[in-house]
């Protein structure tokens, strides 16, 4: 069974781009301010562009939708040119350079670039200006100083993710904005304005789809369909977090029960649901899961619960008992985003875990960051010794796929295998693949 809805070898299907500035808390504020100047600003990951101001769009000869969410390599005339610029600016840390970008009509343009690399892992800022000019100052502040100020704020306000549509005002106005957003989430939960999309998890060697990860979406009345990263910063009430998590679990299990099971002898497609620590500690979670499975008539073996890596640092007898009860039912337990923190590795065997899932930031570093590659290799070796499966999230390139497969990490997920699909589209793809 191949990836739902995708012919073998076809590029990932396009999805309407929704900017997600949760990667850098105040990025939206700085982009708004920098609309007032002539220099272009691009906020980019290692491979994909997160956002750009209007001046950057003009310099690159493209509109916003042709830049934000697209591959960074698409701005360059050749793959070799992209790899050279990425190595010099994003990896080696070169601050100023001349680059040649490709324009849509086939010509090229030379630009000066000032780079503020690694504002946080995998997040960079590029300030662009026409070649021959000197982007030395923005008003009375040098570009270097602005870049540093930008970086320091991203690191500090990452703790309180900037919410779209909320004015960045200090004090009570900021608190009121978060309160309003949280109230909107409560209303969305009560009024049916939430939805689920599903991200394919693929066996990379055969292309067989192994699981679908449920991803929460909010159909905001003004801002449109928002991914979870756009509003997770407004979730501060543990009870609301638990309610949302329970809604996701119930809804996802009902969808998964209708998925085709595939040919005889082949493992049915599993459902993956992310579970917040607040859910695990809220009431009798194991009994809640049992009732949900019973109500949806979904076999426990088809459900995998992804747990935050931080639980490895938690000494809670009740938490351990909950996890043992879930495992005894047949539910699979996985540690999500493994490698992000300094977890106690020895505790991996304390809990009844089946799987660890690599932090996407580590996976995206494969191919151009030796440290990331070394960490991934070490985790894969450790997992094999402990009898744990390793899933890779955030796979973007064939080179990353091949590197991971060489480590026997064949279960992979990410842009290379397609974007998250609506529940209906995911089910249609599964039915088509099993006919």
Image (spheres, grey):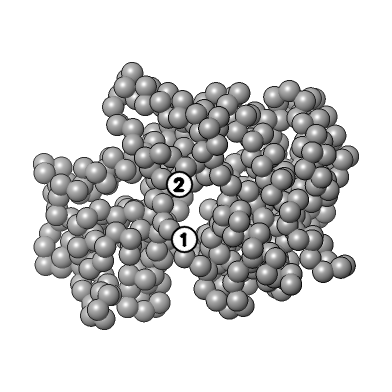
Q: Where, quadrant-wise, is the C terminus in this rendering?
A: bottom right
Circle on res. 15: 1
Any part of residue 423 in sight: yes
Left or right of 84? Residue 14 is right
Judging from the image, what secondary structure is the residue with disc 1 in? loop
Residue 91 image-quadrant placement: bottom left
Residue drawn at the location 52% of the way across and 73% of the way down: 11
- The residue nearer to you, when weighing 159 against 10, is 10
Residue drawn where x is 21% and y is 42% of the image: 33
- Toward the top, the furthest residue is 172
In the picture, the quarter occupied by the N terminus is bottom right
The answer to whether residue 236 is left or right of residue 99 is right
What mark, if any, has residue 89 been given in the picture? Answer: none
Mark-to-mark CA distance, 2 and 1: 12 Å
Secondary structure under tag 2 reads strand
From the image, tell me which residue sits under label 2: 225
Q: Locate residue 422 relative to residue 88 in the image: left or right.
A: right
- Residue drawn at x 26%, y 81% as measured from the top left: 106
Q: Position of residue 141 (x, y in %)?
A: 15, 42
x and y percentages locating residue 258 in the rendered image? 73, 54
Q: Nearer the viewer, residue 399 or 48?
A: 48
Is any part of residue 374 visible from this angle?
Answer: no
């Amino acid at each position: 069974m191949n990836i739902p809805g995708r012919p073998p070898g076809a590029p990932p299907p396009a999805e309407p781009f929704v900017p997600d500035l949760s990667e850098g808390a105040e990025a939206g504020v700085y982009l708004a301010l920098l609309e007032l100047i002539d220099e272009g600003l691009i906020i980019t990951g290692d491979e994909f562009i997160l956002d750009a101001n209007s001046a950057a769009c003009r310099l690159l000869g493209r509109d916003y939708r042709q830049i934000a969410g697209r591959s960074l390599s698409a701005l360059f005339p050749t793959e070799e040119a992209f790899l050279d610029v990425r190595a010099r600016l994003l990896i080696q840390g070169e601050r100023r350079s001349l680059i040649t970008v490709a324009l849509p009509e086939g010509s090229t343009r030379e630009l000066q670039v000032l780079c503020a690399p690694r504002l946080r892992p995998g997040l960079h800022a590029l300030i662009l200006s026409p070649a021959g000019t000197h982007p030395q100052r923005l008003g009375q502040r040098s570009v270097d100083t602005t870049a540093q100020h930008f970086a320091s704020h991203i690191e500090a306000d990452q703790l309180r993710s900037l919410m779209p549509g909320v004015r960045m005002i200090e004090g009570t106005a900021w608190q009121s904005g978060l309160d309003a957003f949280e109230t909107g989430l409560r209303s969305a939960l009560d009024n049916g304005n939430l939805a689920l999309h599903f991200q394919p998890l693929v066996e990379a060697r055969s292309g067989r789809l192994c699981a679908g990860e449920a991803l929460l979406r909010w159909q905001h009345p003004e801002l449109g369909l928002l991914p979870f990263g756009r509003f997770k910063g407004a979730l501060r009430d543990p009870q609301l977090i638990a309610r949302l998590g329970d809604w996701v679990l119930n809804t996802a299990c009902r969808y998964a029960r209708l998925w085709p099971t595939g040919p005889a002898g082949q493992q049915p497609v599993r459902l993956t649901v992310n579970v917040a620590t607040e859910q695990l500690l809220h009431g009798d979670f194991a009994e809640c899961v049992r009732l949900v499975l019973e109500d949806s008539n979904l076999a426990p073996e088809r459900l995998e619960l992804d747990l935050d890596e931080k639980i490895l640092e938690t000494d809670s007898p009740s938490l351990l008992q909950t996890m043992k009860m879930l495992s005894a039912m047949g539910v699979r337990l996985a540690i999500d985003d493994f490698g992000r923190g300094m977890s106690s590795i020895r505790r991996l065997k304390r809990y009844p875990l089946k799987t660890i899932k690599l932090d996407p930031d580590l996976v995206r570093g494969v191919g151009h960051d030796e440290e990331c590659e070394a960490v991934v290799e070490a985790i894969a070796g450790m997992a094999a010794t402990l009898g744990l499966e390793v899933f890779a999230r955030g796979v973007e390139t064939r080179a990353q796929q091949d590197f991971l497969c060489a480590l026997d990490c064949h279960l992979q997920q990410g842009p290379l295998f397609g974007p998250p699909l609506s529940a209906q589209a995911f089910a249609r793809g599964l039915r088509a693949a099993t006919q």
